[in-house]
Image (cartoon, helix red, strand yellow):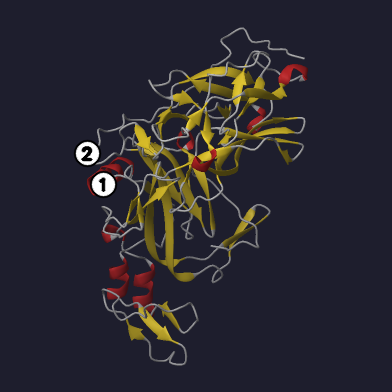
């Protein structure tokens, strides 16, 4: 049964803000103007949210979860679903609202639901909560699909004009993302498009999915971005087959990098630092050929004598010279002249921009193994020449705000939401580079990996 025991306001989840205000971005494109045109629909990202229902148990760290709806909806736009997140982190969420711009083309892109189906009622639960919570599925008419559930604190059905459902041809499939909360076999997850490649059209809505006893409950969908320019020259001198008008221009990308470029923190005993690739070539890197190992070829500074358009067949490889002095000099890198190499690409149907920031390390040092309280070097295990590492900044194309960072760790990695980051120099996230291995972490400390994973 319900047992709140809370004397204060039930929705006290602290909100996160970046250390410094978001800059005013250069003008020139549809980037960061608050609304993204998807073709038949327009969407806006709402970050001002009102709490509807909260739990104080279950979920990550057993701290419960809170569910929200938009505090206000711009004129002409409609709510399409509720938002929820765990209570173990500050509120930094968002949910999209949509506007139909397909008319006078029929049928319209948005429609009213015909009814609601109650899919969860917390009235019989014993966990601590603000009030009873109810989760409703909007019942869509033929040819339309629901893209979000509605959360209420009342057992009464929401009004039919509270949300809109979407024409099915404007939607794509979704899958579970991060776990938000669960109780007695009932679980709530964030949602994301099934296809999330840089050319995928599906976008995240900020809504959530449900499972009961490991089985999916009523199926939801996400929106798709059909507002594309085919064969256009994008600002980064790369000819894209598909381009989104919501993507930033080159000047805007430069401003984003200036605002959010990560600060890399090296271990105090680090020996192997990054360099420019051209420095590595110029200072002695060699190209080896299978069957001719005794006569490697020096690599020219621009790399023009490297093999091109081949496959990884083991015929060629890059290695250090046999001379110990030259080899040791290369291994240390050249931090003072090192470059960051960047790859800019659309994410989630052009509603976000991903800025991949790559560092090149001429050498990866030996791995380590921990046995009890002792740590031992595994050298030469884990040592290798040419070590590329990266982090990815995911930035909202609605307002240019940094929303999360991907930290690469050897062959894997993790997305970390902005509230869980450390910052330096205003809004620049700190990246901790692992000792010798250069894997990226959002915080300092000791991290271990299973032996079957790649050791660095």
First in sequence, mark 2 or 1: give its number: 2
Q: Is residue 7 visible?
A: yes
The image shows residue 224 at horizontal and vertical percentages of 47, 43
At 36% from the left and 37% from the top, the residue drawn is 37
Q: Quick check: 77 left or right of 28?
A: right
Q: Quick check: 425 left or right of 128?
A: left
Rendered image: mark on residue 224: none
From the viewer's side, name the closer residue of 244 and 160.
Answer: 160
Q: Say whether marks 2 and 1 touch (CB < 8 Å).
A: yes
The image shows residue 89 at horizontal and vertical percentages of 54, 30
Residue identified by numbered label 1: 249
At 31% from the left and 59% from the top, the residue drawn is 335
Tell me: residue 416, above or below residue 88.
below
All told, the count of numbered labels is 2
Determine which quarter of the picture holds residue 31: top left
From the viewer's side, name the closer residue of 163 and 234.
Answer: 163
Q: CA distance from mark 2 to mark 1?
A: 9 Å
Residue farthest top in this picture: 7
């Amino acid at each position: 049964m319900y047992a709140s025991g809370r004397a204060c306001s039930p929705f006290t989840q602290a909100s996160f803000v970046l250390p410094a205000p978001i800059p005013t971005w250069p003008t020139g494109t549809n980037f960061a103007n608050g609304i993204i045109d998807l073709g038949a629909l327009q969407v806006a990202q709402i970050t001002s949210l009102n709490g509807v229902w909260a739990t104080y148990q279950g979920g990550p760290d057993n701290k419960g979860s809170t569910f929200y709806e938009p505090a206000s909806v711009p004129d002409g736009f409609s709510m399409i679903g509720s938002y929820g997140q765990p209570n173990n982190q500050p509120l930094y969420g968002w949910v999209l609202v949509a506007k139909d711009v397909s008319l006078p083309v029929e049928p319209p892109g948005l429609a009213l639901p015909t009814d609601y189906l109650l899919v969860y009622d917390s009235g019989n639960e014993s966990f601590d909560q603000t009030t009873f919570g109810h989760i409703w599925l909007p019942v869509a008419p033929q040819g339309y699909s629901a893209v979000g559930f509605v959360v209420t604190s009342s057992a009464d059905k929401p009004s039919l004009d509270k949300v809109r459902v979407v024409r099915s041809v404007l939607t794509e499939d979704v899958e579970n993302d991060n776990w938000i909360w669960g109780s007695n076999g009932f679980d709530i997850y964030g949602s994301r498009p099934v296809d999330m490649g840089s050319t995928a059209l599906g976008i995240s809505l900020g809504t959530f999915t449900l499972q009961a006893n490991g089985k999916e409950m009523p199926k939801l969908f996400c929106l798709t971005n059909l507002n594309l320019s085919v064969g256009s020259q994008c600002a980064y001198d790369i000819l894209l087959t598909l381009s989104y008008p919501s993507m930033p221009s080159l000047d805007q990308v430069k401003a984003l990098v200036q605002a959010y470029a990560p600060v890399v923190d090296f271990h105090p005993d680090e020996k192997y630092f990054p360099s420019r690739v051209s420095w590595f070539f110029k200072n002695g890197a060699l190209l080896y050929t299978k069957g001719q190992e005794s006569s490697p070829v020096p690599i020219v500074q621009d790399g023009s004598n490297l093999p091109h358009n081949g496959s990884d067949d083991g015929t060629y490889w890059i290695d250090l010279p046999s001379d110990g002095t030259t080899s040791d000099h290369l291994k240390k890198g050249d931090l003072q002249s090192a470059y960051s190499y960047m790859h800019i690409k659309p994410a989630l149907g052009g509603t976000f921009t991903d800025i991949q920031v790559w560092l090149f390390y001429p050498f990866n040092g030996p791995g380590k193994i921990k046995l009890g309280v002792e740590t031992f070097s595994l050298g030469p295990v884990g040592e290798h020449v040419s070590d590329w590492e990266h982090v990815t900044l995911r930035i909202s194309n609605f307002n240019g705000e940094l929303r999360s960072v991907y930290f690469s760790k050897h062959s894997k990695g993790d997305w970390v939401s902005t509230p869980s980051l450390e910052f330096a120099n205003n809004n620049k996230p700190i990246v901790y580079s692992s000792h010798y291995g250069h894997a990226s972490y959002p915080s300092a400390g000791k991290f271990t990996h299973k032996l079957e994973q790649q050791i660095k």
